[in-house]
């Protein structure tokens, strides 16, 4: 059975000349693993999916992190033992923020609406 999902590569990453194609493909695979709780596939799992070893995955992660497209954070269990890493896909975060920014701009007039948090008035103090 063929998996119909696909990983997306944001344009900011796609056209970044400082990131090699292999790293861009790796980003797309990480994006497939992104879920509501985050992105934390094991490097061995990623390596197997891409047909390389875990050391190659670590090498491909470096330009993504260096150029600000992802951040890598260690994960620990309740005893404080390291159990892996989580990935924050910063390019996706920036893309979502840009969409939110566009949602607050009136398309006809080009005038920005106030942020949702500033639309609520504070209730008077008693």
Image (cartoon, rainbow, N blue to C red):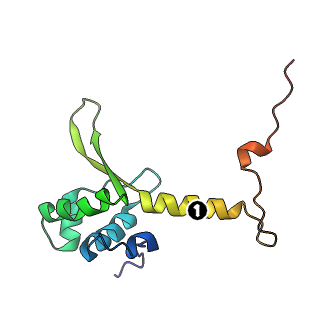
Q: Which quadrant holds residue 13?
A: bottom left
Label 1 Cα crowd, 10 Å radius (few <14 / some 14-19 / many 20+) = few
Q: How many numbered markers are drawn?
A: 1
Local secondary structure at mark 1: helix
Which residue in the rendered view is the most extreme toward the front?
A: 17
Image coordinates of residue 97 in percent, x first then y, are 57, 58
Q: Nearer the viewer, residue 2 or 37?
A: 37
Left or right for 18, reference 114: left
Q: Is residue 121 above or below residue 46?
A: above
- Rendering quarter of residue 4: bottom left
* x and y percentages locating residue 75 in the rendered image: 29, 42
Residue that badge 1 annotates: 98
Expressed as whole percent of the image width and height from the top left, the position of residue 2 reads 35, 82
x then y, percent, for residue 102: 66, 64
Q: Quadrant of residue 48?
A: bottom left
Farthest top residue in view? 126
Q: In which quadrant will I find the C terminus?
A: top right
The quarter of the picture where the N terminus appears is: bottom left
| Residue in the picture at 81% in, 73% down | 108
Residue at the image position 45 percent from the left and 74 percent from the top:
11
Q: Is residue 16 above or below residue 114?
A: below
* Residue 1 in the image: above or below residue 108: below
State the residue in front, 114 or 29. 114
In the image shown, does 5 or 97 lie closer to the viewer?
Answer: 97
Please give the name of the residue rendered at 72% of the width and 43% of the height, measured from the top-left corner.
117
Q: Residue at x 12, y 66 (%)?
A: 53
Judge left or right: residue 2 versus residue 58.
right
């Amino acid at each position: 059975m063929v998996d119909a999902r696909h990983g997306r590569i944001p344009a900011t990453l796609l056209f970044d000349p400082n990131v090699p194609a292999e790293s861009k493909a790796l980003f797309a695979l990480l994006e497939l693993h992104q879920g509501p709780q985050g992105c934390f596939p094991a490097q061995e799992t990623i390596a197997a999916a891409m047909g390389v070893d875990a050391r190659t995955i670590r090498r491909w992660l470096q330009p993504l992190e260096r150029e600000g497209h992802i951040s890598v954070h260690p994960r620990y269990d309740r005893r404080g033992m390291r159990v892996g890493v989580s990935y924050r896909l910063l390019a996706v975060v920036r893309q979502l923020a840009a969409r939110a920014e566009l949602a607050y701009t009136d398309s006809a007039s080009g005038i920005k609406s106030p942020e949702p948090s500033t639309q609520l008035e504070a209730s008077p103090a008693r």
